[in-house]
Amino acid sequence: MKRRTSFQNRSQQKWKSRLLFMLLLCLCVGSFILLLESNPPTMNLPILFAQKPKIAFLFIARNRLPLDFVWDVFFQIDWGEASMIQAERILLQKALVDHTNERFVFLSDSCIPLYNFSYTYDYIMSTPTSFVDSFADTKEGRYNPKMHPVVPVNNWRKGSQWVVLNRKHAETVVKDETVFPVFQQHCKCVQLFREHIPKKKSEDQQDSSFDRIISSKRKSLPEFWRDQPFPVDTSKEHNCIPDEHYIQTLLAQEGLEKEITRRSLTHTAWDLSVSKDNERRGWHPVTYKFSDATSQLIHSIKEIDNIFYETENRREWCSSKGKPSPCFLFARKFTRPAASRILNLSVLGT
């Protein structure tokens, strides 16, 4: 009798244990499903289902996007004190949280897309490389010898800050604890006031300052050009623009230059010598106003298929998927009225 009672007790305990296990299992599965539904992209959870790789567009803006209505059409969705390179690192750090982000595109608040999203996505994702405008900087007065030996001069690079990084290179930028502190200490921009900017220069003088020529038909200064004479003792001052050197120099320092396509996907015009508008003269790239915004302008940018780097005597022919292609997917600088006119002309597509 005692044996039968003991057997029944054991059976009841096993049954209760199994029931408790099933209840706990259901509770865990239910909680996991709720977590996935409430935080699908940002939770650091294993990726259970294959997702299409995404591109993170990182806009560097003062407060808002003045051309947001253009980008609303591009994305077809509704959009809801650090230094420049600190801001870039912070943006990348936040974008890297989403494990499906595999490309990271830096754009300014005055950029417009030249093609639709589908074409832009395929162009960027067609190659595993990053798009980084980078060339050896041979201009005197920009490299600070105090950077040596952490950043040797042979790794000193220059280029546009408007880069497209793959995930590996984005992580390299965020994890960097060697080059960034050196830039904070020794890479600083020499302040230049308006009264020191020359009002007029001869064509020969302007041509001698070109770092590169865009297309074989017309010359265009790079967006990062800062070669106006300075009223300072250059033996004591080094005019280093951090955001035009940091990523390029870091990738060279890490031996990653073979993993990049050495050109930018963002077009900027620097043909200031022909401008009669005083507001357009100086350091900054040409700002396109309403009267400039024509279909001819957009088509002329789309027709550029090569970039010549004068300092390296190197011509970069643009290609996508192994075939010749336009060099640029984006363009700047456009005012809000100019962007609105371009959008209405329906020229921002394939």
Image (cartoon, rainbow, N blue to C red):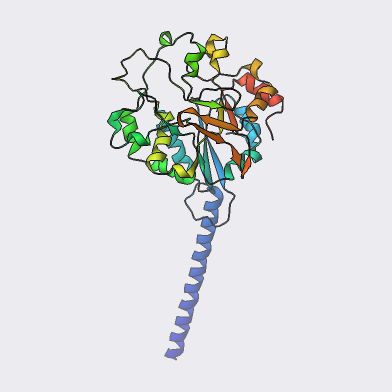
- Residue 113 in picture, x, y percent from top left: 61, 31
Q: Position of residue 104 (x, y in %)?
A: 51, 40
Name the image quarter holding the C terminus: top right
Q: Quadrant of residue 280?
A: top right
The spot of residue 333 in percent (x, y) is: 56, 23
Which residue occupies the foreground of this view, 164 or 58?
A: 164
Query: Which corner quadrant holds the N terminus?
Result: bottom left
- Observer-nearest of 159 and 346: 159
Residue sitting at the far bottom? 1
The answer to which image quadrant residue 3 occupies is bottom left
Where residue 295 sits, quadrant-wise, is: top right
How many marks can you see? 0
Q: Compared with residue 232, is residue 14 higher up or lower down, i.e. above or below?
A: below
Name the one closer to the observer, 266 or 87: 266
**Of all residues shown, which one is farthest toward the right?**
345
Left of 283 or right of it: where is 286?
A: right
State whether residue 86 is above or below residue 258: above
Residue drawn 41% across and 43% down?
172
The residue depicted at 40 percent of the width and 12 percent of the height is 193
From where the camera sits, is residue 77 visible?
A: no
Q: Nearer the viewer, residue 341 or 279?
A: 279
Compared with residue 279, is residue 65 higher up or lower down, i.e. above or below?
A: below
Left or right of residue 301, residue 23 in this image: left
Residue 302 in sight here: yes
The residue located at (59%, 49%) in the rendering is 52
Relative to residue 55, is residue 143 depicted above or below? above
